Image (cartoon, rainbow, N blue to C red):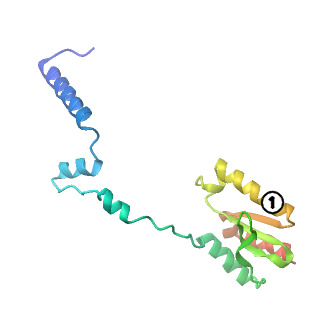
């Protein structure tokens, strides 16, 4: 049990006063609080008018590094060039990372398998199941590979077997 001393009472009163002030004023942005501590001028957030004037552009993601590695392996094995981002369903606009449409073989390179990426989370996994089931019903053979299989060469070895 702590003893009640004048110093403890003073600190308790200061904490209570600061708590009341925060409740009245509301939360303070971290950058403003930090700039106050170091004596720098605070960074001003953009006004609502400026923020509304610059809508975020939707950025189309390009091929990932692991997809580029797989494409390099395909060229090194002198395999027929696959179609990149092949759309196999016009209604849902589903695409394969790599496809050989003439033999209905597709390759999906699944990123983020060890980092909780889209393909390993519940909704992403369920969406992938729907896509791959639709592809199978349409007669496609879909080979799925995590990044580790691409880097180790196991992915390209499997594709070579499937194409020959």
Q: Give the quarter of the figure containing the N terminus.
A: top left
Would you identify the image quadrant in which residue 140 lies? bottom right
**Horizontally, is 59 left or right of 116 in the view?**
left
- The foreground one among 115 and 85 is 85
Residue at the limit of the structure toward the left, as seen here: 6
Q: Give the residue displayed 75% in from the left and 59% down from the top.
A: 131
Q: What residue is drawn where x is 51% and y is 67%?
A: 58
Residue 40 higher or lower than 18, as above or below: below
Q: Nearer the viewer, residue 69 or 31?
A: 31
> From the viewer's perspective, is 161 left or right of 28?
right
Quadrant in which residue 79 is drawn: bottom right
Q: Quadrant of the C terminus?
A: bottom right
The residue at 58%/54% (across/down) is 115
Horizontal side of 164 relative to 98 (left or right) equals right
Quarter-of-image position of residue 152:
bottom right
Q: Nearer the viewer, residue 4 or 111?
A: 111
- Residue 89 x, y percent position in the rendering: 76, 67
* Front residue of 105 and 27: 27
Helix, strand or loop for disc 1? helix
Residue under label 1, please give it.
134
User: Where residue 102 sits: x, y (%)?
Assistant: 84, 79
Pinpoint residue 34: horizontal percent, then vertical percent.
24, 49
Position of residue 113 relative to residue 74, above or below, is above
Q: Position of residue 43 (x, y in %)?
A: 24, 57
């Amino acid at each position: 049990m702590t003893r009640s001393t004048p110093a403890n009472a003073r600190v308790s009163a200061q904490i209570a006063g600061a708590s009341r002030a925060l409740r009245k004023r509301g939360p303070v942005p971290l950058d403003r609080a930090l700039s106050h501590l170091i004596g720098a001028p605070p960074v001003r957030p953009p006004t609502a008018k400026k923020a509304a004037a610059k809508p975020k552009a939707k950025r189309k993601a390009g091929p990932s590094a692991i997809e580029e590695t797989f494409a390099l392996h395909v060229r090194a094995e002198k395999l027929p060039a696959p179609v990149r981002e092949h759309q196999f369903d016009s209604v849902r606009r589903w695409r394969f990372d790599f496809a050989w449409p003439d033999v209905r073989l597709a390759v999906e390179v699944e990123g983020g398998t060890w980092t909780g990426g889209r393909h390993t989370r519940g909704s992403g996994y369920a969406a992938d199941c729907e896509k791959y089931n639709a592809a199978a019903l349409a007669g496609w053979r879909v080979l799925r590979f995590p990044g580790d299989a691409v880097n180790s060469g196991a992915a390209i070895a499997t594709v070579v077997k499937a194409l020959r």
